[in-house]
Image (cartoon, grey):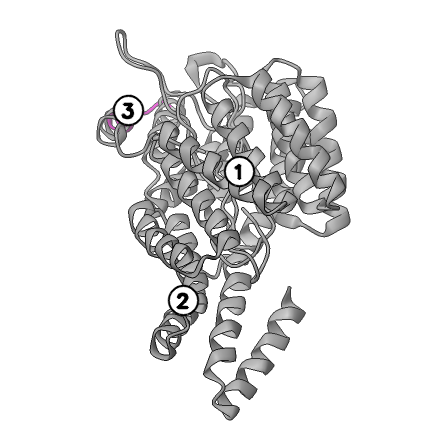
């Protein structure tokens, strides 16, 4: 990716010297896609602002459509789904005006992801069915494969795990047919999540192991981090905390390398869980403190609530009951404030519009009967093509003394989150995808 970015920058310089604004706009979009994949969203947004200005100035509606899709992806990733939807609606209008069915199908798929995040599963499914029809009419097996995965995601969220697994198997076949190894790597993770949710830990582990092998082969460190984190969760549950910690440490290294704050936050929470179980309370508290800082920075109220609750238990065990009560009070307050606005965890499948890049990755699903945080890899990137996906999943909550809940990891898009303690008479807890 670094070599590709270097070449695009050389091209950018030549475009500016030649005053080739049309080509420059396309170039800036491509650079923004790569930077987004590397989590350098501030710089990517700056390039997209210039690209949008150029496209509007020269009347390049096709280039503008691509730019809007990329901007939507960044807004969605930064926790602004409403702003992202505004960009996507304008993109949809342009696609219908231009008769661009391929880009329209991607746009509809990306809108469905946002609706899924906001809890409108019915609305999301309607858009996915239109996207499916467009893909079939165009014989676009590449787009159809991602569409199948996103429909499987919704079925999983609704608890229809058997139906979801059948769709994932269908998607697996299409990925093999189209030689989409990146897609295969995330698909393996999603199938693993289903098996884990069904109580088939050994089957899930075999899929995660194959996912790890494929990610290493593809040098896909983002996907690798999810595979490692999910394996670590199973190993910890099977009573091998040392090996689990080793995998979490590699996961943490990757997340820090790519500035993946969401992945880092979850990894730190899982490591703290292991340290707590081994009686290393001070070390566990230090990780929870960093986890709390990341949760606040991300505005992740669901994870923050769980983090504060776990901190309270650690502080209590350290002999400071007053501080524990304060943490517990903040946790309960956070639950009330975040109940409606933060219902899901990252697990979406964002996509790119056709022609500019590759489909790639995240976010959160509503309450599902399964304790798994689905790692749904299919978050199609909002750009002109597809970027490699990024997974998240939920995991089973291990019962620990004092109700300490380990935080689960991610999944294609794989994360696990801590289980919230429910009040009597209250509703179920939500999971962040």
Overall secondary structure of the magenta section = helix
Q: Which residue is mark 2?
A: 64
Give residue 51's position: percent from left, percent from top: 41, 72
Q: Earlier in the sequence, mark 2 or mark 1?
A: 2
- Judged by depth in the image, the label closer to the viewer, 3 or 2, is 2
* 397 in magenta: no
Q: Which residue is mark 1?
A: 132
Q: Secondary structure at mark 1?
A: helix
324 on left or right of 174: left
Hey, which quadrant is residue 91 in on the image? bottom left
Please provide the residue range marked out in magenta.
Answer: 319-328
Cα–Cα span, label 1 and label 3: 46 Å
Q: Choose top left, top right, bottom left or bottom right for residue 339.
A: top left
Q: Position of residue 200 (x, y in %)?
A: 66, 15
What label sits on residue 398 in the rendered view?
none
User: Marks 3 and 1: in contact by CB < 8 Å?
Assistant: no
Q: Position of residue 94 (x, y in %)?
A: 38, 59
Return the mark for residue 328. 3
In this rendering, the answer to whether 373 lies above or below 1 is above
């Amino acid at each position: 990716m670094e070599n590709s970015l270097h070449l695009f920058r050389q091209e950018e310089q030549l475009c500016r010297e030649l005053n080739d604004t049309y080509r420059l706009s396309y170039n800036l979009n491509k650079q923004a896609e790569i930077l987004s994949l590397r989590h350098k969203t501030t710089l990517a947004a700056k390039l997209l602002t210039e690209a949008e200005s150029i496209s509007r100035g020269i009347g390049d509606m096709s280039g503008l459509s691509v730019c809007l899709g990329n901007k939507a992806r960044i807004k969605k990733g930064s926790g602004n789904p409403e702003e992202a939807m505004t960009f996507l609606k304008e993109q949809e209008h342009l696609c219908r005006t231009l008769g661009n069915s391929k880009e329209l199908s991607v746009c509809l798929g990306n809108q469905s992801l946002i609706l899924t995040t906001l809890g409108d599963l019915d609305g999301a499914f309607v858009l996915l069915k239109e996207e499916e029809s467009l893909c079939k009419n165009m014989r676009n097996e590449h787009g159809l494969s991602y569409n199948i995965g996103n429909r499987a995601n919704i079925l999983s969220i609704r608890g229809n795990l058997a139906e979801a697994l059948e769709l994932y198997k269908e998607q697996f076949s299409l990925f093999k047919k189209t030689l989409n190894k990146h897609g295969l790597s995330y698909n393996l993770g999603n199938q693993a999540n289903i098996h884990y949710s069904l109580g088939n830990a050994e089957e899930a582990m075999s899929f995660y192991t194959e996912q790890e092998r494929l990610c290493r082969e593809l040098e896909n460190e983002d996907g690798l981090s999810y595979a490692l984190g999910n394996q670590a969760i199973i190993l910890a549950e099977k009573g091998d905390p040392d090996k689990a910690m080793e995998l979490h440490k590699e996961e943490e290294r990757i997340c820090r390398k790519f500035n993946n704050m969401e992945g880092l936050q979850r990894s730190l929470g899982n490591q703290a869980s292991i340290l707590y179980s081994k009686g290393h309370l001070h070390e566990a508290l230090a990780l929870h403190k960093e986890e709390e800082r990341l949760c606040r920075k991300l505005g992740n109220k669901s994870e923050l609530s769980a983090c504060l609750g776990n901190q309270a238990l650690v502080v209590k065990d350290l002999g400071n009951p007053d501080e524990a009560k304060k943490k517990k009070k903040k946790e309960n307050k956070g639950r009330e404030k975040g109940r409606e606005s933060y219902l899901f965890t990252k697990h979406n499948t964002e996509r790119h519009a056709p022609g500019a890049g590759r489909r790639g990755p995240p976010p959160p699903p509503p309450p599902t009967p399964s304790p798994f945080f689905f790692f749904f890899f299919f978050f199609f990137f909002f750009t002109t093509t597809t970027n490699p996906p990024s997974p998240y999943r939920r995991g089973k909550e291990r019962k620990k003394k004092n109700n300490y809940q380990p935080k689960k990891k991610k999944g294609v898009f794989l994360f696990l989150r801590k289980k919230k303690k429910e009040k009597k008479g209250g509703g179920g807890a939500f999971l962040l995808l």
